[in-house]
């Protein structure tokens, strides 16, 4: 009996091992910007097999073509004899005699240093390698899969230098000085978890029930992870408040690569760029200009420039809340097109209003409700800027149509509206939900309820989420979706904001403050490079209203706020106002009388001094995140 049980167990183990991907990656013998990869293949039952690399991955909404960076591809049988292989398109290898297939090997090129021009990969989605220092890995760029064999286990075994440690949200199964191994349940989990190998020390945070790891590489600082974690701490506390102290994850990794752009920062922040310096600026920004971040389920990856004074830390915090909040949508709330993503011939979901628009809106109000920014600052800067940008996009193309066709013209050129028009759509949806439920529910409440209903492992059908959403609120909410999400009605920004006691006018005639950073005031600033929200004055006439001097560095928000009282209203004509600037490395306060001129203020927004009882109630809920009984 014991022998039979043991034999059966051994057969089961063999069957499991046979039906898995076992990858080995060599980080030791790194040559010509290429990593060597070997695969012990799962059993193939067909005479011909298709081995694929992703055309794109979830979260990018752009063509990547990872297969372009693969070379020296070989398919071998158990005796290491080569099988016939042809490349079919940019991302697929066709292997003949695949019933005998046992091993695959190939090289992967660093995308950051690649000269590929067509569909050049956005750097946070790519791979960057430097022997003995760092390996920044997006797994879609390293690991492929066979047709119809995505849902089986993957193991990764990295041979590495002893001074490198790998950071990822994948399960670590082994770690020694010369080896680190990870595993995951399927290809979807593999793609959703980038890896950073770095020689530098990580930092840690604890937020609610989640352990947060910050890993980084920056050649000019061994402490970049620590500096980033210091900046992240307040953001994470604001998120903790917003979600009510409970997160749907237990761990999260911030993976960062910082590029030294201090020479560019010195030139730009000097206030005067000389003609001979332009070629250097163009060459450097052209080679590495796609700075930003990419979200994943339990991690996010960042490719950042340092223009000096640890400016990269501010850039992380500027996007970290948005990227982190993707743990809700689409990680825990997504359609089957996301849950069962097709990496070869992707069909995109029509619900970017949910995945990106609402996420960006949440990131905005988290800063306000978490007291990282004042209500007035969020309203006059973040929301106002998004409203202004939203007008660039045509109402004639439904948001859902753009989303579903985002790889095609003209829709690909409209994608960035998800962060602008999509966020304003989220704001107005939030207001509509509060109005219809008399403040009993907010957009956050509905999203969290949907996350409970679906969760990470259960996808919704593309056509079911809006009806389910409406059912959780009020039948009248369907009109909002029909008009603004699936329809072509222009967003009613004025009417929506009025419901929560905020007045909005696209054009408001009357007295407006003079523009301090304008040619009319004899001042120009370099707005192309903004460091920690500061711009540098590169021209200033002697008698300009504020007293700016060439080389002064001023915060753009301070330029607007200096004209405002604490309640958001303008100061009086002639009243002395104060504006801090950095001059020759020291903070100096400029004092000058407020001056107003007749003109037209575009996209004017004001919190109403007198509100109805209902407006007061909804404004309080929106601005604080608290219901009436929580006051």
Image (cartoon, helix red, strand yellow):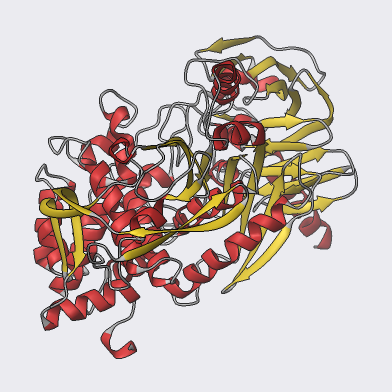
For the residue pair 573 and 473, the one nearer the viewer reads as: 573
Q: Is residue 399 left or right of residue 533?
A: left
> On the picture, is 22 further left or further right than 349?
right
Residue 595 appears in which quarter of the rendering?
bottom left
Tell me residue 529's x, y (percent): 49, 36
Q: Is residue 39 above or below residue 625?
A: above
Please name the residue shown 41% across and 27% down the image: 345
The answer to whether residue 487 is visible is yes
Residue occupying image coordinates x 11% and y 42%: 488
Counting every numbered tag in the picture gives: 0
Q: Is residue 47 visible?
A: no
Return the residue nearer the eye: 57 or 311.
Answer: 311
Task: Note whether 438 is above or below 234 in the view shown.
Answer: below
Quarter of the figure with the C terminus: bottom left
> Against 211, is 93 above or below?
above
Residue 86, how many percent across, how many down? 59, 9
Q: Compare residues 592 and 151 and report the one nearer the observer.
A: 592
Q: Quadrant of the N terminus?
A: bottom right
* Image vertical order of residue 485 relative to residue 371, above or below: above
Residue 612 coordinates in the image, percent (x, y): 10, 80
Picture quadrant of residue 367:
bottom left
Which residue is drawn at the image coordinates 77% and 46% (left, top)? 181
Residue 504 is left or right of residue 586, and the answer is left
Q: Which residue of the protein is positioned furthest toward the front in this rendering?
A: 543
């Amino acid at each position: 009996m014991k022998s039979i049980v043991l034999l059966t167990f051994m057969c089961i183990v063999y069957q499991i091992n046979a039906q898995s991907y076992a990858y080995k990656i060599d980080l030791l013998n790194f040559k010509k910007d290429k990593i060597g990869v070997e695969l012990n293949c799962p059993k193939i039952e067909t005479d011909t097999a298709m081995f694929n690399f992703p055309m794109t991955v979830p979260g990018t909404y752009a063509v990547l073509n990872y297969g372009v960076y693969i070379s020296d591809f070989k398919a071998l049988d158990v005796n290491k004899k080569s099988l016939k292989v042809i490349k079919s398109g940019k991302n697929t290898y066709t292997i003949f005699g695949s019933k005998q297939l046992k091993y695959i090997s190939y090289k992967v090129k660093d995308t950051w240093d690649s000269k590929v021009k067509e569909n050049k990969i956005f750097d946070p989605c790519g791979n960057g390698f430097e022997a003995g220092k760092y390996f920044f890995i997006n797994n879609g760029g390293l690991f492929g899969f066979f047709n119809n064999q995505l849902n089986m286990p993957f193991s990764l075994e990295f041979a590495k230098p002893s001074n490198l440690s790998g950071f990822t949200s994948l399960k670590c199964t082994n770690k020694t000085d010369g080896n680190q191994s990870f595993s995951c349940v399927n290809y979807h989990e593999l793609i959703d978890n980038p890896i950073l190998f770095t020689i530098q020390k990580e930092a840690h945070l604890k937020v609610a029930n989640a352990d947060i790891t910050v890993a980084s590489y920056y050649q000019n600082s061994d402490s970049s992870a620590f500096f980033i974690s210091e900046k992240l701490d307040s953001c994470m506390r604001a998120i903790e408040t917003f979600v009510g102290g409970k997160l749907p994850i237990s761990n999260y990794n911030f993976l960062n690569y910082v590029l030294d752009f201090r020479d560019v920062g010195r030139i730009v922040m000097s206030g005067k760029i000389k003609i001979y310096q332009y070629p250097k600026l163009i060459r450097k920004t052209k080679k590495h200009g796609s700075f930003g971040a990419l979200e994943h389920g339990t991690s996010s990856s960042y490719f950042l420039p340092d223009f000096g004074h640890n400016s990269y830390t501010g850039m992380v915090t500027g996007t970290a809340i948005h990227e982190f909040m993707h743990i809700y949508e689409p990680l825990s709330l997504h359609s089957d097109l996301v849950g069962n993503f097709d990496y070869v011939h992707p069909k995109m979901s029509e619900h970017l209003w949910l995945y990106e628009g609402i996420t960006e809106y949440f990131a905005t109000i988290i800063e306000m409700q978490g007291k990282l920014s004042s209500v007035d600052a969020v309203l006059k800067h973040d929301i106002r800027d998004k409203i202004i940008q939203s007008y660039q996009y045509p109402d004639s193309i439904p948001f859902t149509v753009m989303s579903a066709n985002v790889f095609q013209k003209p829709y690909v050129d409209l994608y960035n509206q998800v962060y602008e028009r999509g966020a304003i759509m989220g704001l107005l949806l939030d207001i509509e939900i509060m109005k219809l439920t008399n403040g009993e529910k907010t957009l956050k409440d509905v999203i969290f309820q949907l996350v409970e209903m679906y969760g990470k492992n259960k996808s919704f059908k593309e056509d079911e989420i809006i009806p389910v959403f409406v059912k959780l609120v009020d039948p009248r909410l369907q009109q909002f979706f029909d008009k603004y999400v699936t329809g072509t009605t222009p967003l009613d920004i004025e009417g929506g904001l009025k419901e929560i006691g905020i007045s909005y006018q696209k054009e408001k005639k009357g007295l407006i403050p003079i523009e301090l950073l304008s040619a009319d005031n004899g001042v120009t600033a370099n707005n192309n490079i903004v460091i920690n929200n500061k711009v540098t004055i590169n021209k200033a006439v002697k008698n300009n209203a504020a007293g700016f001097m060439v080389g002064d560095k001023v915060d753009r928000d301070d330029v607007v706020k200096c004209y405002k009282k604490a309640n958001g209203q303008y100061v009086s004509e002639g009243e002395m106002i104060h504006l801090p600037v950095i001059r020759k490395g020291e903070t100096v306060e400029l004092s000058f009388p407020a001056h107003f001129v007749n003109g037209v203020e575009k996209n004017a927004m004001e919190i109403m001094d007198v509100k109805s009882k209902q407006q007061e109630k909804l404004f309080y809920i929106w601005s604080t995140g608290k219901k009436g009984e929580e006051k």
